[in-house]
Amino acid sequence: SKSTELQGEFDVFISYASEDRPFVAELESALFARALRVWRDRGQLTLGDDLMAKVDEGLSKSRFAVVVVSPSFLAKGWPMAELSALFSMEMIERRKCLLPVLLDIDHESLVRKLPLLSRKLSVGANEGCNRVATEIHAAIDAARRES
């Protein structure tokens, strides 16, 4: 049922390139301040963990995935693999789960690099972490109201 889909262990999974860690840490704090449960590699992984298994677990236990798209994200294989998995999840589960945040990249560049993702409404990191966190919180609240 829809209500159980929204009862995941985490409200949001954050997918990002390691170069963007300073922004992501600030965003994570802003999300925690809004009482959202966040899965992020720094908080969930420990020495010796199987990275792929842990990320798969994080994705499966999270209702939404914030994807911080940046030039570094686009240049790396791992973040792009996460994005591919998230597109698959959306198609299979037929529900919105991808929440794009654009960091140091404009919409036109996104259209050229990731045309499927560019069709989704996104928020720019240049608006500040509080604004980004407010938009994420609003999307999660809307999904809760619909269930």
Image: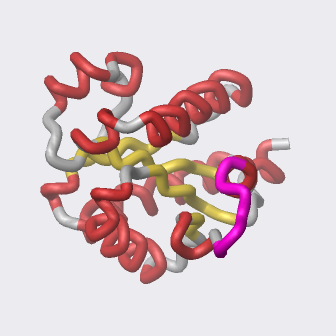
Q: Is residue 49 magenta?
A: yes
Residue 63 spot, x, y in % from top left: 65, 52
Toward which corner of the image does residue 45 lie, by quadrant?
A: bottom right
Q: Residue at x 62, y 30 (%)?
A: 90
Q: Residue at x 36, y 76 (%)?
A: 30
Q: Which of these two is toward me, 49 or 2?
A: 49
Magenta residue span: 46-52
Q: Residue at x 78, y 44 (%)?
A: 2
Q: Is residue 40 left or right of residue 30?
A: right
Q: Which of these two is toward me, 144 or 75?
A: 75
Q: Main secondary structure of the magenta part?
A: loop
Rendered-image quadrant of the N terminus: top right
Q: Is residue 115 magenta?
A: no
Q: Is residue 45 above or below residue 35?
A: above
Residue 92 spot, x, y in % from top left: 72, 24
Residue 17 spot, x, y in % from top left: 37, 51
